[in-house]
Amino acid sequence: MQLIDLRQLQQQLLAPLQERLPPILSKLSPSIAGGSSSKASPSRSSSSSGEQLFTREQLALYVGGKPPNKEQIYIAILGQVFDVSRAPQFYSPGEGYGHFAGTDGSKSFITGDFVGDITDDVSSLDAESCLGLLGWLEFYHKSYTYKGKLIGRFYDAEGAATAALESVHARAQEGEVLKAAREAEEANWPSCNSKWTQDDGGSVWCDEGMYPRKLFMEMKGGRAVWRCACFKELGWSDVRKVYVDCDPDAHLCKTNAEAEAADEDRDVPAELQAMFAS
């Protein structure tokens, strides 16, 4: 059996990141990162910069179809408030995104839960999800009118960022690193082709001259996460497994979900866990 050195694999994964890791916050304008904007409206409740500050009760009045703001619909994401009134087909009561009206439903932008857990508590989201949230925030700044800040989880009564918001930005920067690492790894070891039919079951395959392997990605929730990747080399190891009942030099492998799950559930070597946890 040919083995691949774990530290060598780690270096191969991380080396491309040394040259290309511009954090997402450096790409965002100050208005997106911090919330200031020339579009903000003055109010009797405002921050030191003149931005309007909303309480949750005030924001809840802007849901559309109800007085005193019958024609106005506001939403919030990461504590920043936007006027989406020009798109009632999306945000009016009963429409697809109507659940976002008059509240901050930041978590749902990532989870897709539009019925139950409509909340701005994003503390359970992983790094790449936080990066995705900043992408949504950028979208709203580009597409709608910024109105001010929501007092609560992400901004205090003076309009200053809270520790919760700073945590989101810090995790988003981690997400930028992980995203770049994944893209670099995908460039080196592209994903396999795959298909599944009821008659034939599943199969994975690579182009001529490359071989399908189960590549270890990370430890998540105490479990190993794998993906199918194509390699030019025939070698295999603890982090680069040959598919069950498939020849190492085969370009196409039949997959058996039950057998593969049993193989993946085997203990991951402690050295491997430590390497990817660091």
Image (cartoon, helix red, strand yellow):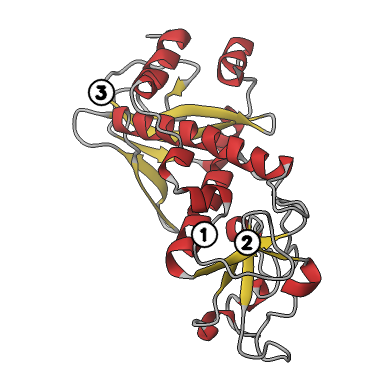
Query: Residues under labels 3 and 2: Cα distance?
Result: 57 Å
In the rendered structure, are the residues bearing label 1 and label 2 in contact, judged by CB atoms less than 8 Å apart?
Answer: yes
Q: Name the element at disc 3.
A: loop
Left or right, residue 211 beside residue 99: left
Give the quarter of the figure containing the N terminus. Answer: top left
Given residues 168 and 98, the one toward you in this image is 168
Q: Amino acid at mark 3?
A: Lys
Residue at figure coordinates x 72%, y 72% from the top left: 59
Residue at figure coordinates x 27%, y 36% from the top left: 206
Residue 182: in sight, yes or no? Answer: yes
Are there few (<14), some (14-19), or many (20+) residues within 10 Å of tag 1?
Answer: some
Q: x, y percentage for residue 12?
A: 37, 17
Query: Residues under labels 1 and 3: Cα distance?
Result: 51 Å
Are there few (<14), some (14-19), or many (20+) residues within 10 Å of tag 2?
Answer: many
Image depth: mark 3 or mark 2 in front: 2
Given residues 274 and 154, the one toward you in this image is 154
Q: Name the element at disc 1.
A: loop
Residue 245: in sight, yes or no? Answer: no
Q: Name the element at disc 2.
A: loop
- Report the disc number at residue 37: 1
Query: Residues under labels 1 and 2: Cα distance?
Result: 8 Å
Q: x, y percentage for residue 135?
A: 48, 52
Residue 63, compared with residue 265, is above or below; it is below
Give the quarter of the figure containing the C terminus. Answer: top right
Q: Which residue is mark 3?
A: 232
Q: x, y percentage for residue 172?
A: 55, 39
Closer to the chain start, of discs 1 and 2, is: 1
